[in-house]
Image (tube, rainbow, N blue to C red):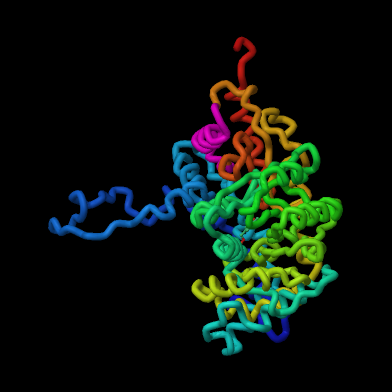
Amino acid sequence: MLVSSPLTNKPNEEDQKVRSGAMSQHMNLLLPSFETDQDEDYVEPKTTENGGIGGGVWRFNGNNAAKKAASVSMKGTLARLFDSCSKDVKKTILPLGHGDPSVYPCFRTSIEAEDAVVQSLRSGIANSYAPGVGILPARRAVANYLNRNLPHKMKSDDIFITVGCCQGIETMIQALAGPKANILLPTLIYPLYHSHAIHSLVEIRKYDLLPDLDWEIDIQGVEAMTDENTIAMVIINPHNPCGNVYTYEHLKKVAETARKLGMMVISDEVYNQTIYGENQFVPMGMFSSIAPVITLGSISKGWLVPGWRIGWIAMNDPGNVFKTTRVVESIKEHLDISPDPSTILQFALPNILEKTTKEFFEKNNSILSQNVDLAFDALKDIPCLICPKKPESCTYLVTKLDLSLLEDITSDFDFCMKLAREENLVLLPGEVLGMKNWVRLSIGVERSMLEDAFVRLKGFFARHIKTQLT
Ligand SMILES: *Cc1c(COP(=O)(O)O)cnc(C)c1O
């Protein structure tokens, strides 16, 4: 028995046991490659140039269409770092390069969300195909959820249900791509934006974020790089990985700039529930009467269920710009030819959004806040890693890497490779996020892992510190 009766919404004793203990082993879905089902003494069968079995010639080959796009992805880099971890280092692998808190028992989703899925599954009405744009109750629920904070209310028709926020990113880039198109992305970015822009042949123009100004957007820089082929400006708010939350005034300036330059704003707000600092979250949709806004979101991060794969594209567009520019049609057409999120999750979505309590988010945010405090303090003993601003949102901490303090480290990637090899500690090189010689570490893990990580980092730093002679 995994779950309590969806009708009473009360966990029974058995559930409590399962909820607290079942996941005590850190199962990590991004497996280090030496954890494999393959036998250790497995030998690849001998192949001829094209083909193998019995000398047959096969007339097909995998193409290279996604090779470049995938090479900038996080998964590719993490796989290489995990490969460098070694069994000979008698330490457990600490995977702080990527962020999936849901693998740790302290970050379990809400019971209301679990019940919502069970209820949907058991109802018998969620077994069929859903429309490409999503089912009406799910679209309506997302509109209500987002409208709580918006002056211009959206209708269910303004919402499209997607396979996580990832499909929102993919769909928007595909829907806007065209010859000569370019897109403005922040220097530190969720890498999937890069991958899809590359894959859709959209030119990437990177604008700066200003670490000394609370990671605000360099708006002058944005103005200077925009031209008539700029399809959109992407902002991430709250920002993964910088961990800042933009102020009302700053976002208003972004909207005014977008209006002046004739572009839309795509606002990735996937972390809008993961905030533990002073700045209040302001949705970009607040300024939709100035410039049209696409908001991307999902339940992956806030509800700690990235494996459930459901999210949304929301059009904040009181001026109907997206209709007259054919953006709405294009989004629909792309969704019509791509896979939909499971109907079970679509039917569960209204209850997930409406029934999960404030306390659930507060509890998670309080754990994250304590982890950030720990990490921020511990960094004082590791001078080669400098965090310009204590995060107030999301589940990461980014640090500048001061190579001048290190003897034999040539780049952020080199730093992360050697750290993986010597300490079995995996961090993410900033290179993958668009900024060289920065390093990102995940704080969405168990406290003991963070403590352990900083002991290892200290040892690593001591071994590689530049001696005074040089
Ligand atoms: C995790 C993440 C996504 C992807 O969200 P999913 O719902 O898991 O597809 C998109 N953007 C940012 C900034 C993220 O951190």
**Residue at the spot x=48%, y=48% of the render?**
76
Give the main secondary structure of the magenta stretch: helix
Q: Which corner quadrant holds the N terminus?
A: bottom right
Using the rendered view, name the quadrant where residue 407 is placed: top right
Q: Quadrant of ligand 1?
A: bottom right
The percent position of residue 127, horizontal first and vertical second, equals 53, 85
Q: How many marks?
A: 0
Closest to the observer: 51 or 16? 51
- Magenta span has 39? no
Please determine whether, in this image, residue 468 is positioned above or below residue 163.
above
**Residue drawn at the location 54% of the way across and 74% of the way down:** 333
Q: Quadrant of residue 440?
A: top right
Residue 253 is left or right of residue 234, and the answer is right
Q: Residue furthest front?
A: 228
Residue situated furthest bottom in the rendering: 124
* Residue 427 spot, x, y in % from top left: 58, 42
Image quadrant holding the C terminus, namely top right
Q: Residue at x 59, y 52 (%)?
A: 182
Q: Nearer the viewer, residue 211 or 404?
A: 211
Q: Position of residue 325 (x, y in %)?
A: 65, 68
Q: Is residue 455 visible?
A: yes
Question: Which x, y percent locates residue 360?
Answer: 76, 66
Q: Nearer the viewer, residue 41 or 442?
A: 442
Q: Is there any visible trace of residue 238 in the rendered image?
A: no
* Relative to 85, 168 lies left or right: right
Which portion, as a residue range, is magenta? 410-428
Q: Is residue 138 above or below residue 40?
A: below
Question: Which residue is at the far left?
Answer: 54
